[in-house]
Image (tube, grey):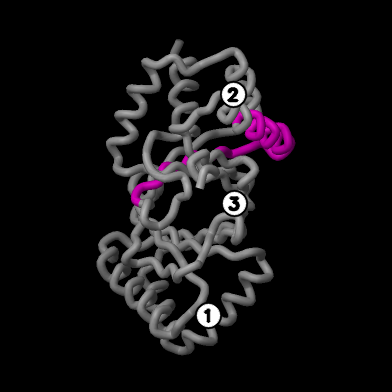
Amino acid sequence: MMKTIKLILSLFLILGFQSVDAQISDKDLNYLLVRQDDVKPSQAAAYETSLLELKQFLGNNNVKHVNYMTQVQDNNFYSHVTPLIDLNDIEGGLKTFVIGDQKSAEFDVIWSYLNSAIESVKYYVVKYEPELSYVTDGNVWLEEAPYRRWNYLYFEPGTEKEAEKLLLAYKNLYKNKGVKSGFRVFRAVIGLDQPVVMFTTWSKSPLDYQMELQESIDLLGDEGTVLWLAMMDLVSATETIEGWYLPQYSFMPMAQKK
């Protein structure tokens, strides 16, 4: 019985909540719930097949309240990201799902195959910080720019305010220099070591990313270097992970209607 309850809760967390527009535009971003699956390397193909079957199952059943964006990282993690209006979405959605009739024989088969390919599952919540992020008009980050780079900056406790000032200065420098490429800043809320900031960037490909990065460095000049080094003085550890947005495994039915 306990195992069944855990599977139901896990199912709900991968599928998402009745929340915001599935296009995941910046105006909609507030909190993001992330389910991170550590997939066995030998089972990656089977796992992706199950994701396709899950997407087809949801589409065939005309499910409208489920929205998630799937990404793969170079550390063999697959993440499924769902936007939340606020943290109350978790409690309200869980109660609704657990008491509802959401299971079927077809779904049980799909879900069992997904679970058999996973070593472990982790959930965390991050909050988007638009005032610290730099996103120019037309700076897309879905199908048009699927390459991802996540920089995890683990700050020394007590330096959060100073780090925020430096991030804001960094954003303003990008704006003043007219840098074309952008970045988004997310702050960990639940499930990650604290204090940590996710500094995320994107591009069409790794090659495009490196070219854009060099262009940004040239434009920012010594001012950019000084600001970045000042921020690194506040950081106890960093981690950089690369990956890709996977539209073929994402389920965003509202976006398909637009």
Residue located 50% across and 28% down the image: 63
Q: Which residue is mark 1?
A: 216
Question: Are the residues tagged 3 and 1 within 8 Å (C-beta)?
Answer: no
Residue located 52% across and 59% down the image: 150
Vertical side of 180 occupied by 57: above or below: above
- In the drawing, does residue 182 fall left or right of residue 235? right
Boundaries of the magenta span: 30-54
Mark 1 Cα shell of 10 Å, populated few (<14), some (14-19), many (≥20) = some
- In the drawing, does residue 243 fall left or right of residue 170? right
Residue located 45% across and 71% down the image: 136
Q: Which residue is mark 2?
A: 111
Q: CA distance from mark 1 to mark 2?
A: 44 Å
Q: Label 1's element?
A: helix
Residue 122 image point, x, y percent: 48, 38
Q: Which residue is mark 3?
A: 245
Vertical side of 137 occupied by 176: above or below: below
- Disc 1 marks which amino acid? Ser
Mark found first going from the N terminus, 3 or 1: 1
Vertical side of 98 occupied by 165: above or below: below
Residue 225 image point, x, y percent: 46, 83
Mark found first going from the N terminus, 2 or 3: 2
Residue 113 image point, x, y percent: 65, 24
Mark number for residue 46? Answer: none
